[in-house]
Image (tube, rainbow, N blue to C red):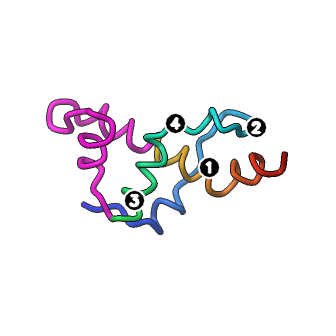
Amino acid sequence: MGLKAQHCAMRSLGQTASRATTDSIPPFTLRILDACADNASEEEMAELILGIDPVLESVRARKAVRSHIDRANWMVTTGSKQLFAG
């Protein structure tokens, strides 16, 4: 089942840091956001971006992908404003 970029943007945000920095954006988080926009499935993102086999480790793969989707959404909606505000 593919993830829609719109769905990704509407997910609840789960960021614990109070301020965003350029160090708080892992490169694969941005790749996850791009994959959401391209309607990639969670399985595709887990395997191709995170290197987790979604067949052998389905729970871990799903949790890892969702965690990175949440972080990416937080960066888009909240963190980027803090980052560029100075």
Q: Which residue is mark 2?
A: 19
Query: Pointer 4 and pointer 2: residues touching (CB < 8 Å)?
Result: no
Of residues 86 and 8, the one nearer the viewer is 86
Q: Label 2 vs label 1: CA separation?
A: 11 Å
Q: Label 3 vs label 1: CA separation?
A: 14 Å
Q: Label 4 vs label 3: CA separation?
A: 16 Å
Q: Which residue is mark 1?
A: 74
**Which amino acid is tagged 4?**
Pro
Q: Which residues are the magenta region? A: 39-66
Q: Secondary structure at mark 3?
A: helix
Q: Which residue is mark 4?
A: 26
**Could you say which disc has been placed on residue 60 in the image?**
none
Left or right: 23, with 30 as reference point: right
Q: Secondary structure at mark 4?
A: loop
**Among numbered discs 3 and 1, the one appearing first in the sequence:** 3
Asked if residue 63 lies in the magenta stretch, the reply is: yes
Q: Which residue is mark 3?
A: 36
Residue 2 lies in what quarter of the image? bottom left
Left or right: 46, with 74 as reference point: left
**Among numbered discs 4 and 3, the one appearing first in the sequence:** 4
Q: Label 1 vs label 4: CA separation?
A: 13 Å
Query: Pointer 2 and pointer 1: residues touching (CB < 8 Å)?
Result: no
Q: Residue at x 22, y 30 (%)?
A: 57
Q: Secondary structure at mark 2?
A: loop
| Residue 52 x %, y % | 25, 33
**Among numbered discs 2 and 1, the one appearing first in the sequence:** 2
